[in-house]
Image (cartoon, grey):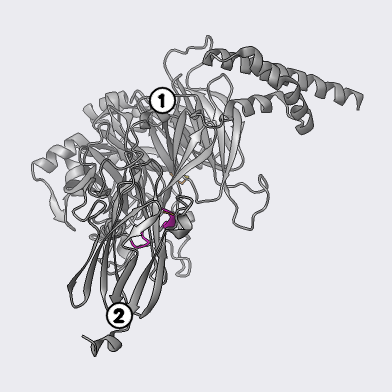
Amino acid sequence: MEKRRLVQTGFALIAVAIVIGAFIIRSSRRGDEPSTAALALGPQADGVIKERQLNPEEVEAALRTYPRPGKYDDEFFAFLSGGHAGTVVVVGLPSMRILKQIAVYSQDAWQGWLTGSKESEEIAKEGYFYKDMPLDWGDLHHPKLSLTNGEYDGKYLACADKAAGRLAIIDLRDWKTKQIVKTPNTVSDHGNYWTPNSEYFVTSTFFPAPQPYGTFEPIEQYAEKYRGTITFHAFDTNAGRIRLEDSWQIELPPYFQDLISAGKKVSTGWMFTNSLNTEMATGGTLEGKPAMETGASKNEMDFVHVINWKKAEELVKAGKTENVGGIRQLKLKTAASEGVLFFIPVSKSPHGVDVTPDGKYICAAGKLDPHVTVYSFEKIQKALAEKNFESNDRFGVPILKYDAVREEYVEVGLGPLHTEFDDKGYAYTSLFLDSAVAKWSLGGPRQKPGEEPWKLQQKLSVHYNIGHLTAAGGDSAKPYGKYLLSLNKWSVDRHPAVGPLHPQNLQLIDISGDKMKILYELPIGIGEPHASNIAPASLFKGAWTTYPEVGFDPRTMKKDPYGINIGQERVVREDEHTVRVFMTQVRSQFRPDILRVRQGDHVILHVTNVERARDATHGLALHGHNVNLSIDPGQTTTVEFDVKHPGVYPWYCTEFCSALHMEMTGWMLVEPRDERSGRK
Ligand code: K7E
Ligand code: CUA
């Protein structure tokens, strides 16, 4: 007891010293009065530390992550995927506060996304498989920031949809989804990546299928008739839009092309894709066949795809493609024979392929093998030049000799998945089975004397079962180091029970020092973050706080032809059944606030928020009509609906915008059609 007390007091004293020390350093850096900060905090902090039994590490972690009220202390933003919530979640680091959820594939009434606004619905429609089959959600895995010279440029965010073979573009001026594209010939995709100057946003299929989609072929003819693809979606960096007419794809064997990474710097022009199920198993558990998981794990080796996309681009320009499902497709045969597509053996069922920041090495981890295999780009080039192939696969794709291209085989631990990098020559690999992050040294001269290259340096336990991890800038040509996020799949008992569906567990790890340290934990109950990109907050300083002019359409990023200013409000009956309304909103009224229509009318409502003040967003919820708009300052939004039933339907502003917000209302008065017919 005595001893424990002593230890505790000792800890508390050390902690207080750290608190004071840190504050003095911090305050002096910021030019505050060091003495006041230290004096004010000392004894009180001591009490808190004692009461909460905090150890010095915890105190330090708290100090390092605590955001001062009203200050922009977050140095980084993490753009996390929301998984099958179909969203992107933005979290500030190191505070780990959720700053925003961006609606992408799924409805979000708060943002007025797919709850009536015509703009959002038209964007979503472009992504449907079939125009008559709406898709109301998506499975968003890997948000990727656009690149200039392989570095994040903070302009756009793109992310594919594993559930539907789509991709979405978010503009980081107003942080809204601008475009959803259905990738031709693709029912599902998983990997996605920008080429180093965002020339293309590239996606690879997960499930191979007969092409174009909508084609039936028996699964018994899987090897002959099913195909994967990798699609190079041409991106117009000025317009911020994918141009499908300039895009093209490469037909691939029916393996599961899981994840992809673009070469950078020395390996610019190349693309790497890991694949699983080279066994071409199809499942069939009730038909006397092995389950997918068994069938797809038979082979000792699967393939990393090595793709010369610059060469492919030349062939596409030379017209060596076929039009398949509305896109130019380089057939597998051509890709294999013309030096576009090669394979490298990789151990069993890999998940992830990651290129080092210098572009020199490609790391792949077989989740059933405790190693990360590192391939050298230089050796790959040499082997290609010398035609050092061990054979062709059954589709005629040359397989490079494993020993000729492998640089290293780094033992990291059980269930390695994804690898990211820092600014000091270290790699970090997530270990799903070990529930740990492995830090290992890359090749080349070491900064630390005596440190061996290609060696495990530390394993840090995380809670629990990590999927992806993300270091700041860790998949780009310019890693920032400092922080790493561990995106854990299980949280089990880490947090209080909130029902059987548990939150995912994110852990913030300090990677600035010699040893990794956990700083903070964020249970996140709004989706399943698979992956993220972490970029300096300063990259996004130019984010808009209002739209540049009143009457702005965020979809076209231009003045909306139906956008109006105060004084131009009007209701126009265009024909017997069509009413067009030009409406404005400003604190705290709608103009008009009475709308007289008749049963059976079709209403087209253009609403302009004429506010110029920052944060003066207004809503418009119309009772009984499944409509809620959210209109930001300067924005114009359109909603169209049929008035099927007579009655009185109020509308109101859903955003608590002013002292008279409760009064910000209106009435839609719907006269029955039959009663009216006798009168006029
Ligand atoms: Cu590993 Cu979709 Cu990148 Cu999930 S994926 S973890
Ligand atoms: Cu506008 Cu409440």
Depth check, front residue: 521 or 588: 588
Which residue type does callout 2 highlight? Gln
Depth check, front residue: 208 or 313: 313
- Tell me which corner region of the image, top left, top right, bottom left or bottom right, holds residue 123: bottom left
Q: Quadrant of the N terminus?
A: top right
Q: Position of residue 313 (x, y in %)?
A: 16, 39
Q: Is residue 570 toward the left or the right of residue 523 in the image?
A: left
What residue is drawn where x is 53% and y is 13%?
Answer: 31
Q: Is residue 307 toward the left or the right of residue 494 in the image?
A: left
Q: Position of residue 15 (x, y in %)?
A: 72, 21
Is residue 474 at least partly visible in the picture? no
Q: Nearer the viewer, mark 1 or mark 2?
A: 2
Q: Position of residue 588 (x, y in %)?
A: 40, 54
Q: Residues within 10 Å of mark 1 (few under 14, many from 20)?
A: many
Tag 1 near tag 2, CB within 8 Å: no
Of callouts 1 and 2, the N-terminal one: 1
Determine whether the residue tagged by mark 1 lies in a helix, strand or loop: loop
Question: What residue range appears in magenta?
Answer: 108-116
Quadrant position of ligand 2: bottom left
